[in-house]
Image (cartoon, rainbow, N blue to C red):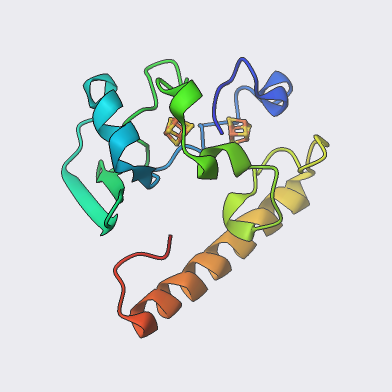
Amino acid sequence: MNNKSKCTCANFVPVQCKAYCCGPVPINKDIYFKNKHKCFREVKNELWISSDMILPDTQQQYCTFLGPDDRCLIYNDRPDLCKKFGKSDSPLLQCPFMDKHGKKRTAQERELVGVEFEQALNAARLQSKLDGVNSFF
Ligand code: SF4
Ligand code: SF4
């Protein structure tokens, strides 16, 4: 996930990228409390999504650990979900700018990534509702 010094796509699309990959993510409780002092964005709610996972809810677009320069403040401790971003086939984990092989996406491909993300998110929300759980993670 986002660490621009390691994000090769940011080499050719630095202006377009708004750190899309760094929305609020669920994190193991021990890792969260170990790093809580590094929270950069205020956590409005600590949502327990299972007995050992917390979603630090900033009520904004970004993860609490995304620093002022768009770098991850807990890079070595970042969740697996962050590590998988841009490298998986899941429509929920696609970088809009670069495919998993490191190839720059066209404008059309970027648009498709957005459409497929929304579709997958809606499907996951529906499934979550049907299952009676409060999270799709
Ligand atoms: S933990 Fe780090 S890499 Fe993961 S979403 Fe937050 S800022 Fe991004
Ligand atoms: S969204 Fe893509 S371009 Fe932007 S920081 Fe994340 S991986 Fe890099």
- At a point 60% along the width and 56% down the height, the residue shown is 114
Residue 34 picture quarter: top left
Q: Quadrant of the C terminus?
A: bottom left
Q: At which x and y percent is residue 61?
A: 36, 42
- At a point 61% along the width and 43% down the height, the residue shown is 84
Does residue 127 show up? yes
Q: At which x and y percent is residue 27?
A: 37, 43
Q: Is residue 87 left or right of residue 120?
A: right
- Image quadrant of ligand 1? top left
Does residue 40 show up? no
- At a point 47% along the width and 38% down the height, the residue shown is 79
Extreme residue toward the bottom, this view: 130
The foreground one among 18 and 44 is: 44
Q: Is residue 37 left or right of residue 102?
A: left
Q: Quadrant of the N terminus?
A: top right
Q: At which x and y percent is residue 28?
A: 35, 42
Task: Work out whether 94 lies above or below 73.
Answer: below
Residue 95 picture quarter: top right
